[in-house]
Amino acid sequence: MEAFFSNIDKVVDGFSWTVRLTLLSALFSFILGVILTAMRVSPVPLLRGISTAYVEGIRNTPLTLVLLFCGLGLNSALGLHLSDQVMWDVFWWAVIGLSAYTSCFVSESLRAGINTIPVGQVEAARSLGLTFTQNLRLIVIPQALRTVVGPLGSVLIALTKNTTVASVAGLGVQEASRQMKLMFDQGIAPVLPTFFGFAVGFLILTLPMGYLFGWLSKRVAVVR
Amino acid sequence: MKATPLVVLENVDKHFGDLHVLRDINLSVQRGEVVVVIGPSGSGKSTLCRTINRLETIDSGVITIDGSPLPAEGRGLARLRSDVGMVFQSFNLFAHKTVLQNVTLGPIKVLKKSKAEAEARGMELLERVRIANQAHKYPAQLSGGQQQRVAIARALAMNPKVILFDEPTSALDPEMVQEVLDVMTDLAKEGMTMVVVTHEMGFARRAANRVVFMADGQIVEENTPDEFFTNPRSERAKDFLSKILTH
């Protein structure tokens, strides 16, 4: 274990990128997920169609392909750059890929939450004269969110672990798993303790998430 | 001197698939009038009530509220609905909002009143339905009768021209029916225009100006409560009354 701990600065640096990828992707996938859900339940057939096609398309594509498309396709082949620094360029492309992918799961969770809301809630809001968007914003989404806090926690945990795909798929973000691989390649750390160390590192990130979301979902639950 | 009626339904028809639930309905409700709609279950009376603020669409015919026809959708419909209160069988209070928030949501978001103004008025209304002391609780913490009184306050907060009641006491435990009917009777006395779908014959006798009897999607008979209950003209009404009145 000594060799692992003597390289702890590399480990911490790796996980700092993991956390940054996770937080930014979580934020964007949440926003995009809410928009996709709003489109999915809207009365406009075109919006519903776009949302359904997007969610079903991306959700059923392997994440590796989505990230390869961002990295090799958009970034390398088409030469689209989001930053002059390579480090940040690949980072933002990874965030885009992860957000594009994860938003589908956010949207599906939210839609499941919406389906649990009794239709009377919506009818009561309509009867007061709330418009469709007000109804969604004030009544439907807040109640749906409260019922899917638990599932969203699972999505976040999956996202945290999915950040490791970013480096495998050719986007060389220096996140934890890439850092680990570099340590192996350079022969500076023994394999098994290093594996173990990084696995614990992920546990330290994700276990509290699970507990936090579990606690939160009980706290905000809507009693009917 | 006959003022224009507040609610008018002309030749309204509606189908649910093969089922013809509303057959050529013609009904008008005057300002300040309390119309009670009764009839056997499946007669279309709830559907009729729900078409008036377009929670149910209609296949043909015209519905006008205060002289203007019901818009099909969009902001026009939302605006019109804000003038038409609705009280549901299952209360439908917003589960994630407190009692007071339930009552102030419409005034703040639709009528664009200030929060302070809406809350003052909200407390006044909760006082009126005798539930002000529960203002900061959530709906699930209240009994059915209390929830329904809050739902009435929520409707009143919009200063509606008319309130529709869709079987407001049918989901209540028997001992809670009276507290809701008392509030409704007070409203009727104060001159609120009301369309009430109910099985409460006592309320119909006490508070209604007119009873509308429906069967098989049609209005079979319309009369004053006294005339209707003591002297029903149609066979369907006689049959219905003989089944529900035990004296």
Image (spheres, coloured by chain):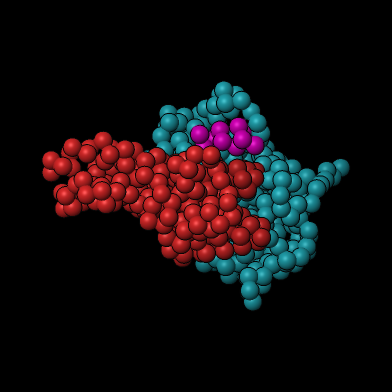
Q: Residue at x 83, y 43 (%)?
A: B3
Residue A205 visible in the picture: yes
Residue B48: percent from left, percent from top: 65, 59
Q: Quadrant of residue B161?
A: top right
Q: Residue at x 53, y 48 (%)?
A: A32
Q: Residue at x 50, y 34 (%)?
A: B101
Residue A198: percent from left, percent from top: 23, 47
Q: Residue at x 58, y 51 (%)?
A: A79
Foreground residue, B147 or A15? A15
Q: Residue furthest right?
A: B1
Q: Quadrant of residue B26?
A: bottom right
Residue A179: percent from left, percent from top: 30, 46
Colour chosen for chain A: red
Q: Give the main secondary structure of the magenta stretch.
A: helix
Residue segment shown in magenta = B101-110
Examine the structure image and report whether residue A179 is included in the region drawn in magenta. Answer: no
Residue B232 versus residue B148 in the image, above or below = below
Q: Residue furthest left?
A: A2
Left or right, B20 with respect to A31, comes to: right
Left or right, A124 with respect to B212, comes to: left
Viewport quadrant of the N terminus of chain A: top left
Residue A148 visible in the picture: no
Left or right, A153 with respect to B8, comes to: left
Residue B186: percent from left, percent from top: 58, 37
Chain in cyan in the render: B
